[in-house]
Amino acid sequence: MVLALYQKGLTTRDIQNYIMEIYGYNLSPETISNITDRVIEKATEWQNRHLEEARTAYIIISIDMDRGGREFEILAKYFQ
């Protein structure tokens, strides 16, 4: 919830008031800031990672139909 509100541009105080109003729970602006800072830090690390370290798989699917649309062939290729 905190991250969704932060992403929408609410300030830490706005988020604090919203959480209190909806859930009756008091989060300090410092706690909210700590949450968003940690997530931004982790997201930045992930964005800047070396791609050689990542193991990504891709599946490419191709559908080939004849002009009448009665016959088709589905080709799938898996890349790792």
Image (cartoon, rainbow, N blue to C red):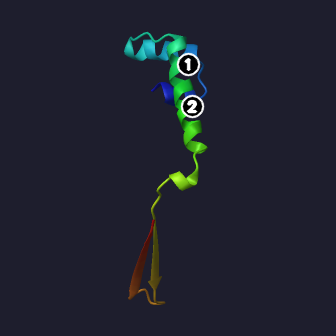
Residue 9: percent from left, percent from top: 61, 27
- Residue 48 tag number: none
Residue 57 vs 4, above or below: the answer is below
Name the side, left or right, on which 64 lies relative to 23: right
Residue drawn at x 41%, y 17% as measured from the top left? 22
Disc 2 crowd, CA 10 A, few/some/many (<14, 14-19, 20+):
few
Residue 71: percent from left, percent from top: 38, 88
Using the numbered discs, state the Cα–Cα distance from disc 1 to disc 2 in whole angstroms: 10 Å
Residue 59, picture quadrant: bottom left
Give the position of the C terminus as an image quadrant: bottom left
Give the position of the N terminus as an image quadrant: top left
Q: Name the residue nearer the viewer: 74 or 8.
A: 74
Q: Earlier in the sequence, mark 1 or mark 2?
A: 1
> What residue is pinned by disc 2?
40
> What residue is pinned by disc 1?
33
Residue drawn at x 55%, y 37% as measured from the top left? 43
Residue at the outermost front position? 53
Q: Amino acid at mark 2?
A: Ile
